[in-house]
Amino acid sequence: MGMDETISTDTAGETEPRRRKADPTGLSGWVQKLGESGMPVFAHTARDISLVSDSSNSGAAELSRVVLQDAAMTAKLLRVANSPIFNPMGISISTVSRAVVVLGFQEVRGICLSIAVVESILKGKQKQHVVEEMARSFHAAVQARSFARKRKDTSPEEVFIATLLFHLGDMAFWAFAGEAAQKMDSAIQQRPDERAEKLQSDVLGFRFRDLTLGLSKEWKLGRLLDQSLEGKSDKNPRAGNVSLGYDLAMAAEKGWDAPAVSRLVERVAENLYLPVEDVEKLVKANAEEAANTAAFYGADKASDLIPVPGEKKGARATDSGAAVEVTEFPEPDPTLQLGILRELSELMESRPDFNSVLEMVLEGMYRGVGMDRTLFALRTPDHQLLVGRYALGAGNEQLRSKFQFETVEGKTNLFSRVIESKQAVWVGAGDNPEIEQLVTPQIQELTQGVGFFITPIEIHGKVIGIFYADRQPSCRPLDKDSFSSFKHFAQQGNLALAYLSGG
């Protein structure tokens, strides 16, 4: 049976082959296929991350929220962020918010896109071509980032990502192309001396480079990647770093003593205005860093294929392959709670903006206390409304958009009571009938009848908003320990915000 066949059984009990939808034939068809059935998660993540701008204080908070919607992404980001490669000082990083502060916005954005592409590609068919391309891409990306840093580039991480994704079309095709990949593989075996791009055009009607450019434009992967694929490296030194990094990675596969490597090292030395001897040391150190980087991203097979000068076979050893345990909903974790509270204290030394504090408190409630959803709602200037501003967890955007309640003075409702009393409330605990009577149909619709926590955010005696948390999506019960931890995070958040506001 062919690999694209399945067996269907009719009512008479007979079987007959049923073919899956055939591979597309044109470039646009392949772009659509990879976005819809090959790499939809990556496409979605890439779009979300590309929409996050670091041009304002809210950028870091927005990036944190995108990452925290994916538990696996969160866990892998923190593993990479705590690795010696990205965190040589060994600063403990327990939260996404802290990762942005310690590593920088662009670094975290780059790590997240890297994780997304590795995860998506490795879910496809594990062909040797995929692993080879991934190894080459990581090696090239680390080399290009190094060159960008030497050139005092304002965003070397953007160069890293553009280089890592420079052959995204190649990797995606080999991972998800099915019969078309078999056909392409056969053509390579039959015409080993044919130039790769001509062979691709003959067999597919387009080049892998065209596929990468199509995916880049469709998924908004960045102008630098587009320029690099469009061959504008002569006019743009940043795009030049991308192509140079990739050329060097390819040449090194023939051996570090190969003449092509020597010529490229001389080109790099000219571009960076450095002695050839220094550049030789630099690019070889970069190769070792690339192998370790790929391993920490979970691409162990690709890591093994990156040529590291002087390394003995099987000598590479990291603990990067340790499985990342992820649950659908975060469990209460007292150790993580302490870590996040410590990071909140450390964060205050840099006098962060309000958004960073709120984001870390919400993350502590979400991941540390083990809530399904957490939200910060702000009172409007006229104190007439309480409106959701930031939310984390399952269905966070729906929660935020629906969270809008009146807090008019003299009109008693649940939220105005919390604001007036300045006390935390556990709705659904069953020990306060007066509070339970204040749960309106609007609140019932929001919470689906399950219990939840609320606590005021108070700065210098004035309540500016509330924190809210529940476990509605999972229907897990609330408990006294969780309520106590929830209140503790809110108290620490209040102290931090009061300090930042001059108190």
Image (spheres, grey):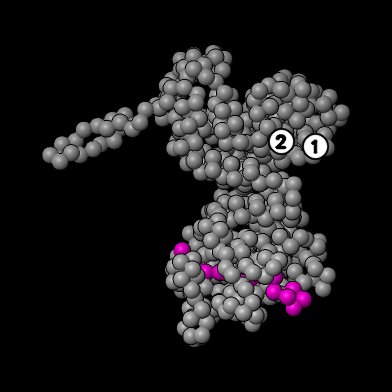
Specify whether residue 276 is in view. yes
Q: CA distance from mark 1 to mark 2?
A: 9 Å
Residue 485, percent from left and from top: 60, 75
Q: Nearer the viewer, residue 61 or 401?
A: 401
Q: Secondary structure at mark 1?
A: loop
Residue at (74, 47) in percent of width and height: 55
Q: Is residue 21 magenta?
A: no
The amino acid on which the numbered mark 2 sits, given as a three-letter code, is Val
Residue at (65, 80) in percent of width and height: 420
The amino acid on which the numbered mark 1 sits, given as a three-letter code, is Asp
**Quarter holding residue 396:** bottom right
Compared to residue 405, the image places residue 158 above or below, namely above
Residue at (58, 77) in percent of width and height: 411
Query: In the rendered image, which residue does mark 1 sit on?
Result: 153
Question: In the image, 359: left or right of 445?
Answer: right
Q: Residues within 10 Å of mark 2 (few under 14, many from 20)?
A: many
